[in-house]
Image: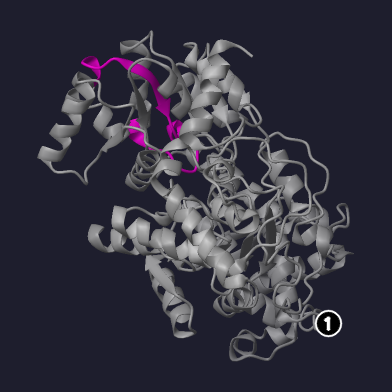
Amino acid sequence: MTDLLSRATRILQDVFGYPAFRSDQAQIVTHVAAGGDALVLMPTGGGKSLCYQVPALLREGVGVVVSPLIALMQDQVAALKEAGVRAEFLNSTLDWKQAQAIERRARAGDLDLLYLAPERLVTERGLALLDDLEIALFAIDEAHCVSQWGHDFRQEYLQLAVLAERFPAVPRIALTATADEATRREIIERLHLREARSFVQSFDRPNIRYRIAGKDTPRRQLLRFIREEHAGEAGIVYCLSRKSVEETAQMLADHGIDALAYHAGFNAAEREARQTRFLEEDGVVIVATIAFGMGIDKADVRFVAHVDLPKSVEGYYQETGRAGRDGAPAEAWMVYGLADVVQQRRLIEQSEADETYRRVASAKLDAMLGLCETVRCRRQYLLEYFGEASAPCGNCDNCLEPPAQFDGTEAAQKLLSCIYRCERASGFAFGAQHIIAVLRGERTDKVLARGHDALSTFGIGADRDEAQWRAVLRQLLTMRLVTVDHEHWNVLRLTDTSREVLTGARRLTLRQEMPRTPARKGAGRPRRKSGPARALPTPAGAAGAPPSPVAAPPLDEALFQALRDWRRGIAREHGVPAYTVLHDASLREIASQRPRTIESLAQVPGIGATKLERYGAAILAIVRAQVALDS
């Protein structure tokens, strides 16, 4: 073991409380600590933060972390302070005197890590501050934000190339959990990381189960999902609009679920209060637009639900990645429907962006629709999107309940013919509801008024219900065999490739829309009421390869809850989220092992020297008290 790695491991153990690095962490840490640049692609919960925090503590000077959101800075700084690290942030939440005091500490060499927003860093004042510091390294977190074609582009990230030009001797590490090959190339080019070493880990999050279903009554479906499978657990629900956020949160609250709405329409104080409740309290469900979540480090989010279709696989992967950061089983659940496809296509087509952007956005949406409609393993599809080969996982909905398929050529021909004949008969096109009504032989006022009950396609699709025809249409839209004319009231039109199906030159295999029975409470979920398996104990940001799966000691539920109550009190006293004191995974380990001495408590992952000194006696007292009650 080299001296550098030995020193890094001691920091990992003493400061962060983990016995060993996992995966590529050791290589990344020693490479950056030795002065090398790096591009790190690592899934959410894989321990990205340690890849720059440990080298920053190894090197002389202050580690400067570029972070895009206030929540990310506050959470990480709070966690670092709990671990005894001298860390601060500079952002808009601080007044002038507070910011000046932090700048003085930085100039005096009294900080190990300093978090800055990119827009603050590139100002004259921000760069002048950096000129005055001895800088250990630059860490550019959420580096995908530099990509103009990515799902979360931020203009100010383009200016971060100044770091390479102004501080050429300072190592830089760019990190992200979501970047396809094109985005990786753009990160390297725009951040001047051509000489950087790339570390690309598996994008797999094996503890997350992916489930996607057709929309029926989405809020009722969501309510059933939470009630029957995640009652009393923390989760995030994503909606596309602010109105939908508020209505969904109210519906959940009306049915007894501790749910809060969150979107950019609330003022800063309201957003902070709602975010704080979600972070600090157990079992809160936050319903939000995608404005919420980036950088949220809450480890025990047990589910992420989407009631509207995300714009891209990258966005979906990043949002679902906020579930199960503690390594315990979690779920990514989504419902989507025909209206989602139409709406997303309309947003792209009506965008004021240039043609190149619209083409890229359209391709990303096609990939997202492919994930929804695939009959293959969902995880396999996701990993292939990011350039990683995988065998079927056996743990997504398609693996557990393989979807039915059928030769959909005839059904497609009926639908395409109906679109054609309705437009030809009337001289203008019609929307999905009318086309399906004609197919099913429904004599609605509109059908009769247009005389479409006399068409040869009237009633030829009576063997399928409306939901099944919508599923067929949804898949034809995904395949671009049908398009939606958004300039004329969202009517359906044939495409240049429709003729291939109508003539029989192209055969189609489609996914069969089948009614699904509601899952029993806890059914089909990799859950352990006694806590996660020993193979999954490591929280977000933690290091150390998990031990081989073995039977875990039974969890003392009463002790676990007593520890959580104690942690909640400490968090309130310190004004920090509870998980920055100790992760649930650490509390579960304590509740399983019941350590009686400081030495045995020190072996629990996540308890470093500072936390052991601060909290060790109190934790052991709680353990002794519970053991006495049980005896």
| Secondary structure type for disc 1 | loop
Quadrant of residue 339 within the rendered picture: bottom right
Q: Is residue 537 left or right of residue 87?
A: right
Three-letter residue code for mark 1: Asp
Quadrant of residue 422 within the rendered picture: bottom right
Circle 1: is it few (<14), some (14-19), or many (20+) Cα within 10 Å? few
State whether residue 162 is above or below residue 483.
above
State whether residue 425 is above or below residue 163.
below
Q: Give the residues in magenta.
A: 130-156
**Quadrant the C terminus occupies:** bottom right
Q: Which residue is mark 1?
A: 463
Residue found at x 44% / y 80%: 253
Evaluate whether residue 272 shows in this view.
yes
Q: Is residue 580 left or right of residue 394?
A: left
Q: Nearer the viewer, residue 277 or 501?
A: 277
Counting from the top left corner in percent of width and height, residue 397 is at 76, 62
Counting from the top left corner in percent of width and height, residue 468 is at 75, 75
Q: Nearer the viewer, residue 218 or 200?
A: 200
Quadrant of residue 323 within the rendered picture: bottom right
Residue found at x 63% / y 28%: 200
| Residue 133 counted in the magenta span | yes
Check the image and name the residue furthest to the top: 169
State whether residue 95 is above or below residue 213.
above
Counting from the top left corner in percent of width and height, residue 164 is at 38, 14
Counting from the top left corner in percent of width and height, residue 404 is at 86, 66
| Residue 566 counted in the magenta span | no
